[in-house]
Amino acid sequence: MLLQPKLNVKVSQRQVLTPGLVQMVSVLALNKLELKEMINSEVVENPVLEELEESGISLDERAGLEGDRERAAEDLVSESKAEKDPFDEIDFGSYFQDYLDPGYKTASSNFEEFDKPSFEHFLSQPGTLADHLAWQLGSLKLTAELKLATELIVGNLDSNGYLTATDQELAQAWLAARAQQRTEPIPFERGMRNRMAPWVEDSDEVDAAGLKSTGLDLAAAAASEVSESDEAEAAVSAALQVIAKARELVSSLDPVGVGARDLRECLLLQIRAQRKEAALVLRRRSPNQPAQGGVFDLSASIVENCLHLLQKKDMRELTRACGRPADEVQAAVEFIRTLDPRPGQRYNESETRLIEPDVAFVKRDDKWIVVMNEEDLPTLRLNSSYRKMLREKDTEREVKDYVKERYKSAIQLLRNIEQRKNTIVRTCDVIVRRQQEFLEYGVEALKPMMIKEVAEEIGVHPSTVSRAVANKYVHTPQGVLELRFFFSEGVNGPEGGDLPLVVLKRKVKKLIEDEDSRKPLTDDQLAAELQRQGIQVTRRTVAKYREEMQIPSTHQRRVR
């Protein structure tokens, strides 16, 4: 059977995302600050778009007025040029300002002084833990091998300062980096002809010419007892020794405790460092008095052997396991509480995020309304000069095509911005209508509401509502809240109604805050108390929400 090419006509339907639709979806998901940044970039790229200033004068009109003023000034200068004395053209004010009177400043100089950035603004971004450690390592004299190992360790620290890579992984990475350095060409310098490579050891055999022996003696190579596998094992062993030295060096840097693999090692490093510091202080005060271990030895023993009892706050079992008096164990526990379990967090703090509400829920004449926050948003309009270019007959074809394309893009952007506003307002209208009791009385009056329900009410897809409320905030009498705050599932609450999960979590947290710390409530007791209030929840549900709020268990909350 022969295969022959054929042409077939087939009619089918499929969904295609046009560039305009893609832009509409992306514009809808932007908050106010992101939308402002996007509009500014579009104004720069699209010459057809222009920002309408508060005075209402377009850029073309302003340019014409400035041109008229410049021409009038040139005419005035040309008329009086013959009458002027060259001596009058000297700017004596600048001479007085720069040389004779340093205390005098004109209004223009004050404006320039005001516009200069202060020293606090010179730092482009806050320093991280890696930057802080690299700054300390840069002040030390390290060999190339040790420096490379410390860089690998610092690069594998997480946000808490813990080392995530194993010694074997670090050793393999160190060997690979060393091999890459050895293959790099050596820069030519004067006198390099008879100079050995920097990685050649002094113990290597060197011939009379000053070059390393090539080792081409096959008989000697065959008689060698060291095989390739033995050489690889020796290389890995040497790499592990370098990694161990680098880990010890990084662990001694500030903050103390970085480079540890777990909480136990981190606390032990801090206890060891504070013991050395205390010994130095005691030696300075009384050189002949021997150093006392005391609370440091007991604290290290607790962290090493009884950390699980310390996490449960079981002081009775902890005292029994240590075999020491209760007051000494309590003093050791108080000392351990002063240690930092996450030493790297202080250098990895997230930057403050600027939030500006996109909408506001305002009450006017006993009616809640939605107000869009369009302050500082550029007001756009189309430039009429390019419209004239399209009507002129002598305009080139390529110019007309470019202007038409820019006009289409500008009109599409204006439509998408208006569509974004309408979608957000319609979504917020439904939120205000359903959550009026929340706006009046607070979180306790919040009602459960789903995105699907709002989408069906305004006649759009649920993904559209999800984009309309994403990363957007609203100003309410109860504070500035994220729009997603109003969307929450419900549980079976009192009187057969649904209770939002936000309210349920607040009730669980309130019960735990009001409990007796010596007899904290269990999850069963919390569930029973909520059931007495008419909220049908189980113990498993209470435990799930307690863990989501990062509230410790009953044993960890108990204070003995």
Image (tube, grey):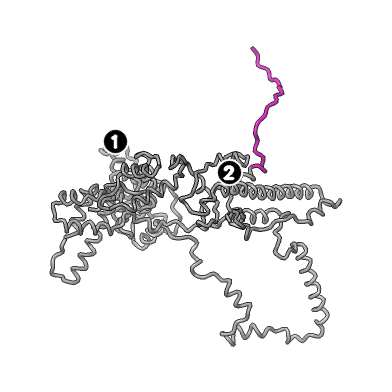
Please name the residue shown 15% across and 64% down the image.
291
Most common SS among magenta residues: loop
Please name the residue shown 27% across and 53% down the image.
517
From the image, tell me which residue sits under label 2.
Answer: 465
156 or 246, which is in the foreground?
156
| 219 sits left or right of 380 in the view | left
Residue 72 on image: x %, y %: 81, 74
| 302 sits left or right of 191 in the view | left
| 307 sits left or right of 6 in the view | left
SS of the residue under disc 2: helix
| 233 sits left or right of 119 in the view | left
From the image, tell me which residue sits under label 1.
Answer: 222
Task: Categorize mark 2 by other alpha carbons within 10 Å: few (<14), some (14-19), many (20+).
Answer: many
SS of the residue under disc 1: helix
For the question of whether residue 202 can be seen, the reply is: no
Is residue 4 covered in magenta? yes
Q: Which residues are magenta?
A: 1-21
Is residue 277 covered in magenta? no
Task: Categorize mark 1 by other alpha carbons within 10 Å: few (<14), some (14-19), many (20+).
Answer: few
For the question of whether residue 343 can be seen, the reply is: yes
Q: Amino acid at mark 2?
A: Val
First of labels 1, 2 by sequence position: 1
Q: Is residue 478 above or below residue 90?
A: above
Q: Amino acid at mark 1?
A: Ala
Residue 482 on image: x %, y %: 52, 51
334 or 111, which is in the foreground?
334
| Quadrant of the snapshot with the N terminus | top right
Residue 84 on image: x %, y %: 78, 85
Residue 270 on image: x %, y %: 27, 57
